[in-house]
Image (tube, rainbow, N blue to C red):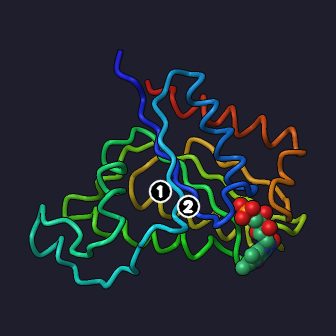
């Protein structure tokens, strides 16, 4: 049987931080369920802002004109069955690294819709304030709800928790369990 492909993209500069820790749990859950998991850390990758050239729409099949590390990620996005975006909340929304990456999904769209349609999404979010509304986590999570509705993609689950210092989330056993369960659930393709 074909292995389910799970692509995990982390938008925190802290490789041992909270969103990365939850992302690793998602990966562990998905791998235990037999999936092939690949993880990319956006921080350190060269990802330019979308320049709105619309080249892709003018010339179908052209792809994104920008020459940077998104060239590695576009094929991964296309071939993944499930995509996990893990981000800290920065200034009441996703981190800038995550936003640059998301803006570049624009090049996956055409008059026929988006190449991300039908993908299964998992969203992971960490933030320092105890309250998800006050922290801005709700804004960030709502962004993904709107984006996935627009793309025609399904959100399989959203895992989010409060933590400040890098790795603090490891002490939150229930959110760690949720992240592992999300990894498993992402592989359950009917
Ligand atoms: C630049 C910056 C902006 C932040 N903005 C917020 C915020 O708006 N709301 C919040 O609750 N926490 C905010 N935080 C705290 C982080 O979201 C929190 O520490 C999170 O757990 C970091 O996740 P990470 O370890 O995956 O990087 C901010 C942290 C930084 C460095």
Residue drawn at the location 48% of the way across and 27% of the way down = 35
- The residue identified by callout 2 is 144
Confirm or deny contact between disc 1 and disc 2 (CB under 8 A).
yes
| Element on which disc 1 rests | helix
Q: Which mark is residue 122?
A: none
Q: Is residue 32 left or right of residue 37?
A: right
Tell me which corner region of the image, top left, top right, bottom left or bottom right, holds residue 93: bottom right
Query: Residue extending furthest left?
Result: 59
Q: Label 1 crowding class (10 Å Cα cut-off): few <14, some 14-19, many 20+?
A: some
Q: Visible in this render: residue 133?
A: no
Residue drawn at the location 80% of the way across and 43% of the way down = 175
Instruction: Indicate the position of residue 114 as horizontal and vertical percent values.
Output: 30, 58
Q: Quadrant of ligand 1?
A: bottom right
Compared with 184, 171 (above or below) is below
Q: Is residue 35 left or right of residue 111?
A: right
Residue drawn at the location 37% of the way across and 70% of the way down = 104
Instruction: Indicate the position of residue 77 as horizontal and vertical percent values.
Output: 36, 51
Q: Which mark is residue 148?
A: 1
Compared with 177, 149 (above or below) is below
């Amino acid at each position: 049987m074909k292995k389910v492909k799970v692509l995990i993209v982390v938008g925190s500069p802290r490789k041992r931080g909270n969103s990365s820790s939850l992302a690793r749990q998602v990966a562990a859950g998905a791998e235990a369920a037999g999936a092939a998991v690949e993880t990319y850390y956006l921080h350190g990758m060269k990802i330019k802002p979308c320049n709105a050239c619309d080249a892709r729409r003018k010339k179908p099949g052209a792809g994104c004109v920008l020459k940077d590390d998104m060239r590695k990620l576009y094929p991964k996005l296309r071939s993944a069955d499930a995509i996990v975006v893990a981000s800290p909340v920065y200034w009441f929304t996703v981190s800038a690294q995550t936003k640059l990456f998301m803006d570049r999904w624009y090049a996956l769209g055409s008059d026929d819709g988006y190449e991300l349609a039908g993908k299964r999404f998992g969203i992971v979010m960490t933030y320092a304030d105890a309250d998800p509304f006050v922290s801005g986590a709700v804004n960030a999570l709502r962004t993904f709800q709107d984006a996935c509705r627009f793309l025609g993609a399904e959100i399989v689950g959203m895992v989010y928790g409060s933590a400040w210092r890098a790795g603090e989330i490891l002490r939150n056993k229930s959110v760690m369990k949720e992240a592992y369960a999300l990894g498993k659930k992402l592989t359950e393709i009917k």
